[in-house]
Image (spheres, rainbow, N blue to C red):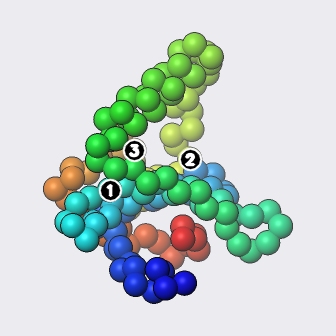
Amino acid sequence: MAYENNEKKMESVYSKRIKAGKRRTYFFDVRETRGNDYYLTITESRKRNDSDGYDRHKIFLYKEDFNKFIKGLNEAVDFVKTDLMPDFDFDAFNHDTPYEGENESEKESQPSPQPQSPSDLTQDNGSNEEVDKW
């Protein structure tokens, strides 16, 4: 398709990978537009049960929607945690997989991971583990 051939491939200026179980991985990628603006892509990549491929679902989130999106996400998560499942221990799942780039000894010394500031926009090199986000 001609449109695809003319489209410049947008590189990530920041990437965060979150492993969520054996078959699911989330990617948070900050990308730059041609007009020197930024947007966020959120990708869920799931390994297919019946083949070697992956299913991907992607959300594009633009700066004008960041606050509304975060507010809506927080409200939905809080509703589940406080109204639907108040007795469930959501922290019980924090121990199984360290955050990308964090080893086990760092994890034990830091009770909760600190998000990187937007000024630290760096490319995440990832690991050797096979994951397909595209």
Q: Residue at label 2?
A: 96
Give the amino acid type for the residue marked by disc 3 in the picture.
Glu
Q: Nearer the viewer, mark 2 or mark 1?
A: 1
Mark sitting earlier along the chain (2/3): 2
Give the amino acid type for the residue marked by disc 1 in the picture.
Tyr
Q: Residues within 10 Å of mark 1 (few under 14, many from 20)?
A: some
With respect to residue 71, does 93 lie above or below?
below
**Labels 2 and 3 touching (C-beta < 8 A):** no
Q: Residue at label 1?
A: 39
Q: Residue at label 3?
A: 108
Q: Position of residue 52 (x, y in %)?
A: 74, 74
Q: Is residue 92 left or right of residue 13?
A: right
Q: Residue at x 54, y 84 (%)?
A: 1
With respect to residue 70, does 3 lie above or below?
below
Which type of secondary structure does the marked residue at label 1 adopt? strand
Q: Nearer the viewer, mark 3 or mark 1?
A: 1
Which type of secondary structure does the marked residue at label 3 adopt? helix
Whether residue 18 is visible here, answered yes or no, is no
Give the amino acid type for the residue marked by disc 2 in the picture.
Asp
Q: Residue at x 35, y 73 (%)?
A: 10
**Furthest-left residue in this view:** 119
Mark sitting earlier along the chain (3/1): 1
Q: Residues within 10 Å of mark 3 (few under 14, many from 20)?
A: few
